[in-house]
Amino acid sequence: MNDFIDPRLEKAYEALLEGDLKTAVSLFEENLKQSPNSINLMMELANTYHILGELGKSIGYYRKVLFIRPNSPYVMYRMGVALYRSTLFVEAIDVFNKIVESGKYLPMTYLWLGLSYYHLGKEEQSIKAYRKLLEYCPETQMANYYMGVALKSSGNYDEAIVHFEKLLTSCPTCDQHVSALYHLGRTYMKNFNYEKAKIHFKHALELDPENKNAQEMLDYLMDL
């Protein structure tokens, strides 16, 4: 029996299930006018706007939810990701650190924290965050990839190679990770191991013949 469900709200969820996100948010907005303190409606709007890429509106609704329910780790996490994707890295770091301090967090919080630090040029703090994630999830491909990138940027080439190699051997198809192959080639290049650098640039080009960066590096190394 749906006698007690507002038809407009029911239509909003139907639109959401059908992938008609713009109709869904329009209907959720209408319902919110009738129930202005509904956390569920605010979260539906925040999450749906996030998917639509309207990050400013998404963050605005997350803030409204946090005003009513302060320090909710889930809401803070979602808002932190939206802040990161809006390139508001300083604010994102503040949110992710608060989540970590609360002790109630998903390990992936450290990934977003590390990414935020990295984009501010704070490689050492970025690496520290990735190390925490790898304590919980040592096989996480994203953690090993971004750890390798951060280590390469900070000049820790030997350790960067370890993480890229770990990623590329972590599953049967992981050796097809073109970006990791390219970065591994660059790392070997910076570490003056030109033969291994060539191998990885060639592999990247076999998988992605249009990869101009790998081609440029390979051309540069051909006479070395």
Image (spheres, rainbow, N blue to C red):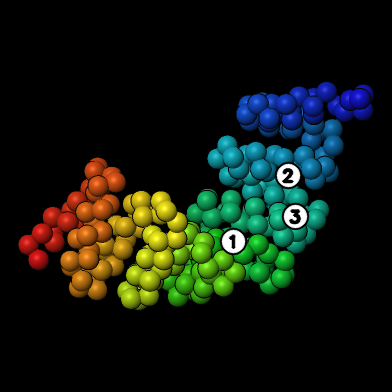
The residue to which callout 3 is attached is 66
Residue sitting at x 68%, y 72%: 101
Q: Is residue 65 left or right of residue 6?
A: left
Please, what is the three-letter code of the amino acid marked with disc 1? Met
Q: Is residue 2 above or below residue 197?
A: above
**In this view of the protein, can residue 115 be seen by the observer?**
no
**In this view of the protein, can residue 218 be seen by the observer?**
yes
View extreme (left): residue: 223
- Tell me the SS state at disc 2: helix
Badge number at residue 108: 1
Q: Are marks 3 and 2 in contact (CB under 8 Å)?
A: no
Please provide percent x and percent y for residue 133. 56, 68
Categorize mark 3 by other alpha carbons within 10 Å: few (<14), some (14-19), many (20+).
some
Please, what is the three-letter code of the amino acid marked with disc 2? Met
State which tag comes first along the sequence, 2 or 1: 2
The residue to which callout 2 is attached is 43
**Distance CA(mark 1)–CA(mark 3):** 21 Å
